[in-house]
Amino acid sequence: MARLLILACSATKRPDPGSIPAFDRYDGPLWRTLRAADPAGTRAKVAFLSAHYGFRAASSQIGVYDARLTKDLAARMIAGGVTTCWPRPASSSQPDTHGIHAGAEIAGLTAYGAEAPAEVALVGGQVYLEVMHALVRGFVEMGCVRRDARVTVINGPIGRMRHDLRA
């Protein structure tokens, strides 16, 4: 049974220079719990939601950055849906020719829907969860997440979240 875990990014990041996989870059308590619970990455396909990078596979190479997901930015992500590329251009007058969109990432993670997950876990704070829910709806419409997929939300005190993530 295919599983998808979407985890909020982390303010705590390893300071390694250059780009490294997000799975290794993020170093907050939830990411540490994930690495301890599934070090080989066999229990689920893992993706993250970032204010800077948008939705990406946890294997994506990322650099150090500092950005928070605000309600305004979350609303823009939701409005842009699965076809808006992230990161966004530095200026609205620049062409929108860089970044990756969530639809391309989920297609790669699910072999274009051939491995559509039957279970999805969303992990993060309320603003992140709003965007994650919207993206999952778009992924269902694309055929990359099963319509009958069971969606589990992991939110609350950090100790409870770490416990639920391990499970």
Image (cartoon, helix red, strand yellow):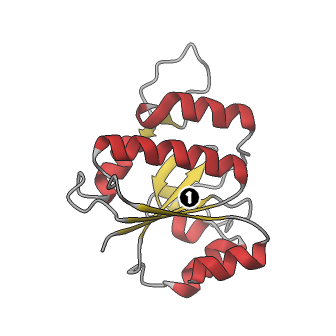
Which residue is at 57% across, 86% downward? Answer: 36
- Would you identify the image quadrant in which residue 35 lies? bottom right
Percent position of residue 77, x then y: 57, 35
Task: Give the answer, above or below, for where 152 lies relative to 130.
Answer: below
Q: Is residue 53 visible?
A: no
Amino acid type for the residue under numbered disc 1 = Gly
Q: Residue furthest left?
A: 114
Which residue is at 56% across, 71% downward? Answer: 24
Which residue is at 37% across, 49% downward? Answer: 105
Nearest the eye: 108 or 95: 108
Percent position of residue 146, x then y: 32, 55
Q: How many marks?
A: 1
Q: Which residue position is annotated with label 1?
A: 18
Task: Give the answer, above or below, for where 85 lies relative to 156.
Answer: above
Left or right of residue 115, residue 63 in this image: right
Nearest the eye: 158 or 24: 158
Percent position of residue 101, x then y: 42, 39
